[in-house]
Image (tube, rainbow, N blue to C red):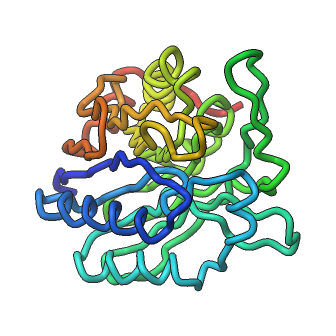
Amino acid sequence: MEPYLAAVIQQTSTADPESNWRQVEERVRKAAGCGARFVSTPENTVLQGAPNEQARRAETLGGPTCERFAKLSRELSIHLLLGSFGERSDDPGRCYNTSVLFGPDGERLGSYRKIHLFDIDLPTRVQFRESEHVRPGEDPVVIATPLGRIGLSICYDLRFPELYRRLVNQGAELLMVPSAFTMATGRDHWEVLLRARAIESQCYVLAPAQFGSHGDAGLRESYGHAMIVDPWGQVLASVADGQEFALAQIDLARVAEVRKALPVDHRL
């Protein structure tokens, strides 16, 4: 297929869903106006508040958040990835952290529940237990689209290369990593891990990101640096600070070219 433009959005979400929606809608429209046929948003796009808020305000896949994204993708005739939102589970105290991909007709093409949850303890810097309020997903997801076969992941999944090996074995050509990477880990690990996943998987990696303080008394600060990486591991576009988006050309012929030049057997 012909090359096309893709965009990864960087924003600063808070505990105010309506404000977050206005921010992301503006950037999605702007990216589409620049020619992007595929636009993706960060983890926790519409709500980044206290840890238990995501579960308390969780919705179904047919709820108002997904309806808004479906309507927007249909209006703009783009593929649109809702990086993640709180999807209701049968446990009232825990939700799923779920990505949803919409097609240009507004159809929900598929969804993915985050498998690897952010349970960490970096003394004096970051302590967080996502599993207290989020249930882990179980299944890797690759979605076939006219823009390529898209493998889904979310944030902390980035540290687990075996997941991406499975996505490539299922045919993935693009890997999505919507994130809210902490400042403490992002400085040292974010770009290194994104480029590593691109190189070993020989895929494009698209990583929309949260940035800055989220209005929770300094409890969470995100690193930002949303970026798009090609199958050779080169950073094609990135956002430094602030709320904006990165735009780059995706050419699936480049995936085939790299895989032919440097064959890698992804079977275990």
| Location of residue 211 (image quadrant) | top left
Residue nearest the observer in this picture, 134 or 142: 134
Position of residue 71 relative to residue 85, above or below, is: below
Above or below, comparing residue 32 to residue 65 in the picture: above
Q: Is residue 165 visible?
A: no
Q: Residue at x 73, y 73 (%)?
A: 88
Picture coordinates of residue 35, whole percent (x, y): 13, 59
* Residue occupying the point 73% across, 16% down: 124
Which residue appears at 37% of the width and 66% of the height?
A: 80
**Can you give x and y, in whole percent of width and height, for residue 189 in the image?**
53, 19
Say which of 261 and 175 sits in front.
175
Residue 23: name its quadrant: bottom left
For the C terminus, give its image quadrant: top right
Q: Position of residue 238 (x, y in %)?
A: 28, 33
Q: Is residue 43 left or right of residue 255?
A: right
Most extreme residue toward the left, as rendered?
A: 34
The answer to whether residue 41 is left or right of residue 39 is right
- What is the tally of numbered marks visible in this picture? 0
> Quick one: 108 or 29, which is closer to the camera?
29
Relative height, residue 133 to residue 265 (above, below): below
Q: Is residue 234 left or right of residue 57?
A: left
- Up the image or down, 231 lies above or below 152; here it is above
From where the camera sits, is residue 143 visible? yes
List x then y, in percent, for residue 2: 16, 55
Q: Residue at x 51, y 45 (%)?
A: 214
Q: Quadrant of the N terminus?
A: bottom left
